[in-house]
Amino acid sequence: MRVDLERRDTENDTPPPDGATTTTRGAGWWHEVAREVLARCDALGAITEQPGIVLRRSLTRAHADANALVASWMREAGLAVRVDALGNVIGRREGPTRDARTLMIGSHLDTVRDAGKYDGPLGVLAGIVIARALRDEALPFALEVVGFSDEEGVRFGRPFLGSRAIAGSFALEDLALRDADGTTLGDAIRAFTAHDGSIEDEIARAAIDPRSVRAFLEIHIEQGPVLESVDAPLGVVTGIAGQTWQTLRLEGRAGHAGTTPLALRRDALAGAAEIALMVEAHAHATPGLVATVGRIDAHPGGHNVIAGSATMQLDVRAVDGAVLDRALDEIHARAESIASRRSLRLAREMRLRQAPVICDATLRELLARSIADAGLPVFSLPSGAGHDARILAAIAPVAMLFVRSPDGLSHHPDERAHEGDVARALEVGCAWVRAIADGDRATARTTEGGSR
């Protein structure tokens, strides 16, 4: 599906400031390009490792095919395309000068298992449409659209590998990570890029100079029910919750289910179940905290055998860093108490710890103003999910724009986005880029005037 982005709704055109060709388009035009974005999400959804579900892990053939399709759309938008060592696909429009900074728009192209079609790709495809819509307009900065790889962390158990490479925070020891088939991340990179040189050098080349980045915007489905509950199509993200992933291992003693008295058991699975309920109760009692035991594996796993060991995967999040730290301490103390009372040994491994991120106040205000100018209610909310914007926040001011999720569904095949909401997001995204451009030009004029 291809929409003519050169068409103008002439009755809505406004005089171009400072030589730019800024154009205001009507609602019908935005709906057309929204349909294009949704159709392209469907096309990407057909690129999968496993028929019948959407599964697109990083550095796989499906990832390469998705990158190739996205790259073709980037080129249609007038962007020069490159793919870095981690498989990030990047479309770039150069700035007016060699030292112009870069405004980045993007999200991720990888998916969870049995995913929906909009978590990640919607933001990449929205960025491409915004770049096309602004193609003939003068901007005081370069513009890049990024499709990040491995935000979800499904293949190697470590999220944000693509955005870490771009932000210069990729840990080289992660090259030794292995997927379920035993393939290391380093070997997967070699196979994906067909590069015979130093992987470490290629990863270093993927990193960008923080001084060169003007800002980063991520447009993303909300993945929750809040916007729908307040009847708001869009939301300005205030910040991204701090996030921890932990593995808890309980060691007890296996035994016969029929001959071992209850009072003499050291049942690791029962201990894990009690800890899971404790975690849930603690989250209910702590405002601003969410905590989830998403998986428990018990060994040996027989219906007539007491579990001798159990492994739990624990996810704890909060936007307030102090709340998160206190919760972790309290959960650990209570888990130790449960294990001790049940004569179990408890070991913990922190697999991921991300501090909360506050989105840039100025960029948030520009988003809020763009939403209001579009005649929409302005609603702000935190993000409980992790996003690539969290990683980019270490090197640049970031903003996030949420799009309403019908029924709050995400990481689910029935994940959806309304055409009208996507149309509004595209309109607001374009207005936001123009507002930054106008502000930068005004600052430059003031600076030039003061230097005379």
Image: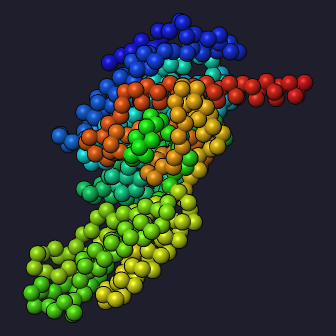
Left/right placement of residue 272 relative to residue 102 reads left
Q: What residue is at 55 percent from the left and 31 percent from the top?
A: 371
Q: Indicate whether 340 appears above or below 128.
A: below
| Number of on-image labels | 0
Q: Is residue 266 visible?
A: yes
Left/right placement of residue 271 relative to residue 382 reads left
Left/right placement of residue 108 relative to residue 249 reads right
Left/right placement of residue 156 relative to residue 358 reads left
Q: Position of residue 261 (x, y in %)?
A: 16, 92
Q: Position of residue 47 (x, y in %)?
A: 26, 35
Q: Is residue 63 visible?
A: no
Q: Quadrant of residue 251?
A: bottom left
Q: Position of residue 152 (x, y in %)?
A: 38, 49
Q: What residue is at 21 percent from the left and 42 percent from the top?
A: 53
Q: Position of residue 450 (x, y in %)?
A: 87, 28
Q: What residue is at 88 percent from the left and 28 percent from the top?
A: 451
* Foreground residue among 142 and 129: 129
Query: Which quadrant of the rendered structure holds the N terminus?
Result: top left
